[in-house]
Amino acid sequence: MLAERLPRPRFLVVAVLTLTTLATGGLVHANRAQDAARHERLAEKLAEELQRRVEIYAHGLRGLRSAFAGSVHVSRAGFSRSVASQQPATLYPAAIGIGYAQNVLPADREAFLREVRADGSLNSPDAFASPPPADRPWLAMKYAEPEGPNATVLGQGLESEPRRRAAAERARDTGEPVLTATLRLRGDGAGTPGFLLLLGDYGHGPPPIDEAARRAAIRGWLMVALRADRLFTGAARVTDHELDFAVDELRPGAEPEVLYVAAATGPAAAAVRGPGSSTRTLRLGGRDWSIRTRPNDAFQAASHAPAVATAAGGSLLALVLGLLLRSQRTMLRHAHTLARTMTLDLKRAAMTDRLTGLPNRARIIDRIAQAMADARSGAAEGPRFAVFFLDFDRFKQVNDRLGHDAGDELLRLIGGRLRAALRSEDATAAGRMKATPTPGRRTRDLMAARLGGDEFVVLIEGLGGVADAEAVGKRLLDVLAPDYDIGGHTVRSTASVGVALGNAGHRDVAALLREADAAMYEAKRRAPGTLRVFDAEMREEERLRMQVAADLPRAAERAEMRLVYQPIVRTRSGGTESLEALVRWDHPELGSIPPDRFIPLAEASGQIIPLGAWILDRALEAYAGWRRDPRFPRDAALSVNLSRRQLADPGFCRTASTLLAKHGVPASRLHLEVTEREVMDEPEAALRTLAKLRAGGIRIDLDDFGTGQSSLAALHRFPLDVLKIDRAFVSGLGVDATRTAVFRGVLDLARTLRLEVVAEGIETPLQLEIATSLRCDFVQGFGLSRPLRPEDVPAFCHAAAGGLNRPRLAA
């Protein structure tokens, strides 16, 4: 009898509770490491958000400085218009005022006061009430917007207070935005804690290249007064309010000063200390801040939810089973059903992506492995299933422009479209099979999953062949192509799709995903928003790519790498302006490997950092040798390409400085070339690195101008010296009126911005003639000279200087 075989309720309840206790303990233990990692990720996001907030104000000051760079002096009306054009009330919520202080020498004091009387700045009775210093420069607050609440600061001297004076001197010497130590701000009338962010104004053009020149050229300071509470309020949104945090100002020789605390429980400052807290140092505006974080109740709730659910579910299950076993035997089936449902729910939660509700990485990998096993057990040949790897274009820009919340919303919308697309595809496939049944072919199974970030995978089983996979992929592209509406913003983020076909021969899930990933990158490289199926050619390409990637780390030390140098020539004299270093790889088995094959691999693997340092070292070594040769012109420079990874590397500026000193090469003789795509990939990091390099005397060239997405933005925002117009425009000179007009327009724009211009890709006499007639500064291309071996450079330069009064095409 079934009732006789049933266990006693007491034993069953004890067994279930024991298993529940063990499972709960295991989950708690596993969650600790995950919680620590999640805490660090959220703390990093918080630090990035705080850094982004300060950078917004720094960029605003740079924009104002650029607006005044061409002015003889900064007028009151011009300052007011420029500040109003930046919409400070909307864009700068932490600012209580934006001001300008002029560097007034003792001999210029009377003329300065006459000027402020003439333009009405002395109308307020509170303005210029303090006497100026008698024997030193007066760093006089000349303008402040809005003037009403800030009238009391007019005429105040930055030099009169140590913290303001120290920040002003540091901003003058570095040419970069600098924060003061914490102050009691005067502009809001309440003495609120905050800071001044100051930026030196040097008159015409960008900041001079060395500190002594910057000190001599300083005209004044642009500044913004920031309330600490407004600057930090709301930053916790990027952590989903799961972290309490505090911001301290670190002061040498003194205790840190607490600037802001966002804590769900109190006492506020104490709530962000103790066990579980984390501290990191963030350097902004030349000052060190300490960011303390600690998980709060919301974090703990999200962290403990699986363990609590397991404990509660197990206890409830034990209670229900005990009650059911005491009741009628017919209720046993309901108990089994309930236990099975709860178990499935727990498994489903562990295999589901929390953000999108789609299956997660673990579940899709398990499903692909099952599809492989099914394919091996079947009798049919050819493709049995397909893996679609989806990556979304411009997702990072959405995060940067609209914030992480908008990025999360975009991922949720993508997940919803994929679910709807697969339901439609499943219904369509079922209809086709019902209308035209195929012997041996089973019903199609479909699954979409999120791997992480903006990467999604779709698995489709029961395929009819390559054409079937391509048709499904195109329908996915159509579903994902329309724009998204996120918080009132129209967002376009098309998908690039790679497809890998699975058959009975596949046994490695990771290898199949790599194939789909490789196909996706090939689609993105050829045309973003398209589809590519992994094929035999790509398999061979992947094999070669893996060999190249494996051999790359030791290629330089095996003497397989070498540098050649392409001249950049002056159009007026024909003399050599610079030599651009180009790397070549002579592989012992694969022969000559072009840079566009191995540089992307070096970028992806991080090998570009040591490889880039090796290239710069060898190029400077060659350049130092040329300078000792009497045939080499003393004013010729060296140009070296800079990669995206190097731009983001915080140690690159130190590496460049060390190598220049090692070879005795002046910084002004080194040009570092960056492309628009590299600059705009991580614009904030790139801006910081380029500014430091240029402040050290190195010149910055923008390469391949015209091929990126933000040409004018790059020109306006970044510290540049030379513009290199891409060969795509140069090739049309004289034969394409539109490209010739664009070329002329770029030259005019560059002259306005005081940038020198190089025309790349000169190959014909007509191109050279037009570039010269339009007064392009320099030219470069195979028509003038192919890349030279190091030992051939002095002879070329000597011939160009002695035998040419203008460049001629090479024979």
Image (spheres, rainbow, N blue to C red):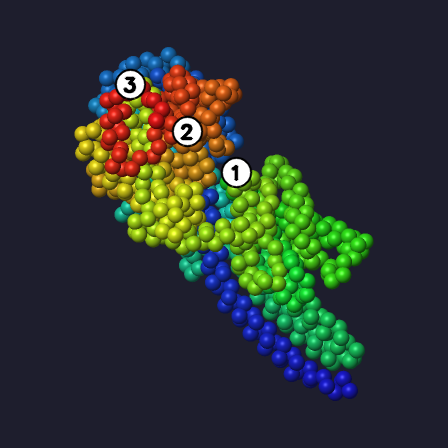
Residue found at x 69% / y 71% = 339
- x then y, percent, for residue 78: 43, 18
- Residue to which mark 1 is pinned: 401
- Where disc 1 sits, the SS reads helix
Q: In the rendered image, which quarter is residue 139 located in?
A: top left
Q: Give the residue at mark 2.
A: 761
Vertical order, 122 against 15 (above or below): above
Dot 3 corresponds to which residue?
Answer: 805
Label 1, label 3: how many angstroms apart (C-alpha)? 50 Å
Q: Residue at x 23, y 25 (%)?
A: 136
Task: Say which of 642 and 31 sits in front.
Answer: 642
Split into 4 quadrants, where in the image is the N terminus?
bottom right
Earlier sequence position, callout 2 versus callout 1: 1
- Residue nearer the viewer, 281 or 771: 771
**Tag in front: 1 or 3:** 3
Provide residue 113's location: percent of width, then percent of height: 32, 16
The type of residue carrying mark 3 is: Asn
**Contact (CB < 8 A) between labels 2 and 3?**
no
